[in-house]
């Protein structure tokens, strides 16, 4: 496999340096869901595995698909191939992915008694397949680019666990937030402990950055976001700072749809290294709000990958300009790549970021 690079290759460190807000030769780029269905080689490996879950649970295959986008594109980071729902699966909810549908739990969490039964899974036994994948990917990457480990936020995991499946509005958990907040807090508390242990174990297994996905944080109005999501993101960040390995890794918080009313500032106050930003706010405004305290990761509308190459380049240039000539930008989409995207468009995007990012960095002096 043609992955290893020379000891002084900037790709080894560009991403980590940008997360620490240090100068880089150009803007680093990786893409959420960079390993996924838009790649024919991913679809072939998944067919070989038999299902998405079999793929995610077999370390050799998870490693193979993690590396697939890196063999095609000049990306600056790899992200562990797995899913946020591994934790509730290990808690005994029975995760299933029916072909062409989203996730579904055989045993959703609906009552105080259901919540009382949940325990914190031991990462090195019940989630061993994830840690084995991290170790194998680190070995195969051989230092070419850093590996990102990840987990879902307690709130976002709870959304799926209570509803039992994906939903547009997750009305069941919102009803629980109003009618039985004490039970919901018990659920979020056990999830925060599970997520912290899981991320710490990924760090110990070799992950070089950690990312928390709060995909459904934006469903909550600001006071409820503070109570049911931010509080637990904060608890996890604190726990990781006390962990011997995880403490030195950059933590990226991505709370989709959460940009208003001081929320970006509050997320930066957790002490995280970077905020993932969706495309509902300009990077310039996000940066004005949080200042130089954290790096920013984002935030191209994923649908821009359906535009003509010249338009993709134009959007990349506009986004780099919006961030401005400072260190501390990791280029990404504002959410995951969708399955219909042409891989050629991803090549155009990655090349444009590196080419135009050089100029953006140079103009910054
Ligand atoms: O390349 C990467 O980004 C790493 C792998 C990754 C996956 N899921 C693989 C996956 C990551 C980081 C995730 C995170 C994840 N999973 C999130 C948070 C980020 C986000 O997208 O908002 C969420 C909410 C999930 C839960 C989940 N997993 C859903 C709702 C679905 C079905 C919808 C969909 O996109 O298909 C999945 C399945 C899933 N996870 C796939 C992949 C590649 C597609 C499954 C397939 O191959 O059939």
Image (spheres, rainbow, N blue to C red):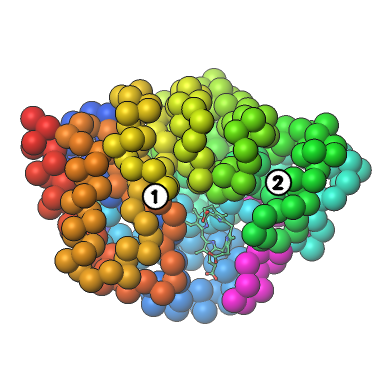
Q: Is residue 90 magenta?
A: yes
Q: Residue at x 32, y 66 (%)?
A: 305
Q: Which residues are magenta?
A: 86-104
Residue denoted by label 2: 158
Q: Left or right: 161 with respect to 288?
A: right
Give me the disc on residue 279.
Answer: 1
Q: Residue at x 33, y 53 (%)?
A: 300
Task: Give the percent coordinates (x, y) of residue 218.
Answer: 57, 44
CA distance separating discs 1 and 2: 25 Å
- Residue closer to the observer: 220 or 267: 220
Quadrant that contains the C terminus: top left
Can the viewer see residue 212 in this picture?
A: yes
The answer to which image quadrant residue 34 occupies is bottom left
Quadrant that contains the N terminus: bottom left
Rendered view: 188 above or below 356:
above
| Element marked by disc 1 | loop
The residue at label 1 has a CB less than 8 Å from ligand 1:
no
Can the viewer see residue 142 in this picture?
A: no
Q: Characterize the local packing of mark 1: few (<14), some (14-19) or many (20 or more) Cα atoms within 10 angstroms.
A: some
């Amino acid at each position: 496999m043609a992955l290893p690079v020379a000891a002084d290759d900037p790709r080894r460190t560009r991403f980590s340096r940008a997360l620490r807000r240090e100068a880089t030769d150009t803007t680093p780029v990786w893409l959420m869901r960079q390993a996924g269905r838009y790649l024919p080689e991913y679809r072939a490996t998944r067919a070989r595995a038999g299902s998405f879950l079999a793929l995610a649970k077999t370390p050799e295959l998870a490693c193979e698909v993690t590396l697939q986008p890196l063999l095609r594109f000049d990306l600056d980071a790899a992200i562990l191939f797995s899913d946020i729902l591994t934790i509730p699966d290990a808690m005994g909810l029975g995760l299933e992915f029916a072909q062409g549908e989203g996730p579904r739990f055989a045993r959703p969490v609906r009552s105080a008694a259901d919540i009382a039964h949940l325990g914190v899974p031991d990462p090195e036994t019940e989630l061993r397949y994830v840690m084995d994948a991290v170790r194998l990917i680190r070995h195969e990457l051989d230092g070419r680019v850093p590996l990102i480990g990840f987990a879902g936020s307690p709130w976002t995991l709870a959304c799926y666990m209570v509803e039992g499946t994906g939903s547009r509005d997750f009305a069941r958990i919102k009803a629980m937030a109003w009618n039985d907040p004490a039970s919901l807090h018990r659920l979020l508390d056990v999830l925060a402990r599970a997520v912290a242990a899981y991320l710490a174990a990924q760090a110990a297994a070799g992950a070089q950055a950690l990312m928390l996905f709060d995909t459904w944080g934006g469903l909550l109005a600001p006071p409820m976001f503070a109570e049911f999501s931010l509080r637990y993101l904060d608890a996890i960040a604190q726990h990781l700072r006390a962990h011997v390995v995880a403490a030195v890794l950059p933590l990226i918080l991505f709370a989709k749809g959460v940009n208003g009313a001081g929320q970006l500032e509050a997320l930066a106050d957790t002490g995280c290294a970077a905020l993932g930003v969706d495309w509902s706010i300009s990077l310039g405004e996000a940066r004005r709000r949080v200042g130089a305290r954290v790096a920013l990761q984002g935030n191209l509308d994923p649908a821009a990958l359906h535009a003509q190459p010249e338009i993709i380049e134009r959007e990349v240039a506009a986004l780099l300009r919006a961030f401005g000539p400072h260190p501390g930008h990791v280029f990404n989409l504002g959410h995951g790549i969708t399955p219909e995207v042409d891989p050629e468009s991803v090549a155009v995007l990655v090349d444009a970021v590196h080419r135009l990012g050089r100029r953006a960095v140079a103009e910054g002096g």
